[in-house]
Amino acid sequence: MAASERTPLLSTASTTATITANTSAAETPVDADATLSRPLSKDGVDPAGTAAPPKTSWLASLWSPANRVLLAGFIISLSFSFTQVTIFYAFRLMECDVFYSNHPPFTGPGDRCSRNEITAGTARQVSLLGISTTFFGTWNLFISGRQVKRLGPRAALILQTSIPALRVATQIVGVYAGGQAGIWIFQVTQIITVLGGPAGYILVVNTIAGEVVAPIERTALFGKLQGVIMLGMAIGLLLGGVVGDTFGIVRPFQVAFFLFLFASAFAHYAMPYISPESLSGPGAKTNRPGGLAGFLEPLKVMLPQKIRLHAGRVANHYGIFFLCFGEFLGVLATGYAPMLLQMYATATFDFDQTNNGWLMSGNAFMRAFFLVLIFPRIIDAGRAWFARRAREERRAKRTNRGLSSSSSSSATVSTTAKTPKAAVKSYGATATSPSSSSSTSSSNSAAATAVATPVIPDIPTQPEQFDAPNATLVEEEPILVTVPTGESRPLADGDDGDDAEDAAAAAADDEKAAYAFDLFFLRWSLLVDGIITAGAALGSQPWHMYLITVLLPFASGSAPAAKGVITTMCPSSQRADALNAITLVENMARLATLGLFGYVFAALADVGQAQLTFYCNGALAVLAMAVLMFSHFPPRDSVLVEAGEAEAEAEAEADTVAAAETEADSAEA
């Protein structure tokens, strides 16, 4: 499915099966997934006359579209996280003002805001802010997806970064207002998140990332993108707190405002332009539904797909459904782990704000390190492993087929040796000259020659018996076939079209095997994540918490792997909707895990067994892996059936059945 799709910023695939020597002056389009290139001769000259593409400079490779997308993700995540720590202390100061507006002024040493009433009020306001941000951010996913389809990814990214600048500007007003008015300003301005927020920009940058590289490279780029987002978040949390402590509580909001403006300018001038039409692809609907139906269209991606099997039968494929369900359970199990570590460390080991800050920053930095540097290498090595296994299976099948063909050839030779004498004499009489003076020895020699020669009674012997040629056949030069996994083999002289078709089929098999590793990694990463999370319950020392927060990121590649799998299972026309759907599933799971495991932790903490929450997380992660076992790619040689085509086939089948029934009734009558 992914082998034939087109990526807007890459060259289109060439459909030419053979390349002749007399077309050396013409340029052949280069496929992003399977490249057909001519080998150079021994003296370094291209025999076809088409020179290899010049090497790009290190500056051009550094400023590639993929790296620009990564830099944009870092800048935007830095902008969003720059005020995260400061917002908590801003609410604390505003709650303090509200408390002393109804109580006597504070007298005595210490912090005037260190009261249980103020702490409880701050916790309520921060919780309400988090719930509203998640709720409005979920709706922001639908808005941003609609913007991508109508305006294109670059324009949508500009909106997703410029509108938050407006929200930060209103929060500056709230900080200056203070008290209850400032609290209301902060809470009400979260409605702006519907038009532009942290959920929408992640969807847009993932959409751009899926278009600037070949399909085989998407999963690794999704992982790098999530890694740089985590890196920007970690740096923003640290720098925002330092700036707030050094220059005052309002300064982080002012810095974030200019960071959002810079991010908008960067998106406008540095992001590649991708037209909305190129995202739709050849199989997209020309008239998309409007209103609420068009607004909720990304949810249709999770419905079962119709595929036509090799035998011609149409069946339902539930790969995407189980993928989304398993990813929901996975995020539900692992999304609460950082917060759970922080709460458990505070309740059990008396961690203060500094300890928790190092705990969370260390987790974010380690996750960024894993996703940017280690995750792509794991994906490349795993895909090479799966492709190597696929090649070994094909080699074993070819060996078995060769043994079978050799045995059948032996049987054919023995059958030919027993050719009837009448046929041999007839062919010999036709082939030899009818001279009456020929000797007996020459007749025996002609008969022996006829026995050794295959019997072809209708062989043409006159020029007029040959068909006129349709075109002039040009001798072909060797072609180097390169598959995405890096395996290449030259087609020697004399290879026919079947060998080229076999090479194309082998390349498709290698690509499918490579994508199968993404799903394999997704399943087992959830299992490893569950084991590490459950192991946190065994921690008995404060340093155990730091060890767990360092180990957890090494199983954090499930989200980019899920994005890579779902974009492969869907056609190119639904790629944006697929990313929207999987991001929506992850957002809903994060919202659900806050309520579910927050309640579980509180209930177990009341009975003094708070560590059992880690076991609940681990068990749910194992359940998510079990659900993902039901998700798989469509069978080989199957074709995805679009919705309109499936309806037309169903109507045609119903008409055929009705016609058959009518004919049967008339025959009985």
Image: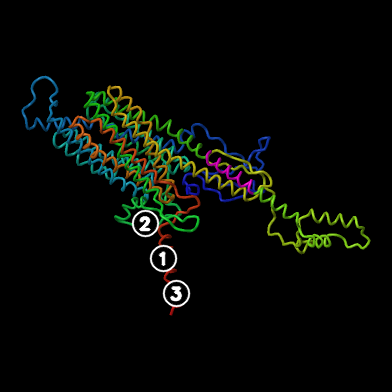
Q: CA distance from mark 3 to mark 2?
A: 42 Å
What residue type is disc 2 on? Arg
Percent x, y of residue 215: 47, 43
**Secondary element at image label 2:** loop
Q: Nearer the viewer, mark 3 or mark 2?
A: 3
User: Was residue 402 drawn as part of the magenta stretch in this picture?
Assistant: yes
**Secondary element at image label 3:** helix
Q: Main secondary structure of the magenta part?
A: helix
Q: CA distance from mark 3 to mark 1?
A: 20 Å
The numbered mark at residue 651 is 1
Q: Residues within 10 Å of mark 2 (few under 14, many from 20)?
A: few
What residue type is disc 1 on? Glu
Percent x, y of residue 509: 52, 45
Mark 1 and mark 2 in contact (Cβ < 8 Å)? no
Q: Residue at x 41, y 67 (%)?
A: 654
Q: CA distance from mark 2 to mark 1?
A: 22 Å
Disc 3: which residue = 664
Percent x, y of residue 328: 32, 43
Q: Earlier in the sequence, mark 3 or mark 1?
A: 1
User: Was residue 312 drawn as part of the magenta stretch in this picture?
Assistant: no
Left or right: residue 205 compared with residue 291: right
Q: Nearer the viewer, mark 2 or mark 1?
A: 1
Q: In the rendered structure, which segment of residues is drawn in magenta?
A: 388-404
Disc 2: which residue = 288
Residue 222, relative to residue 421: is it above or below?
A: above
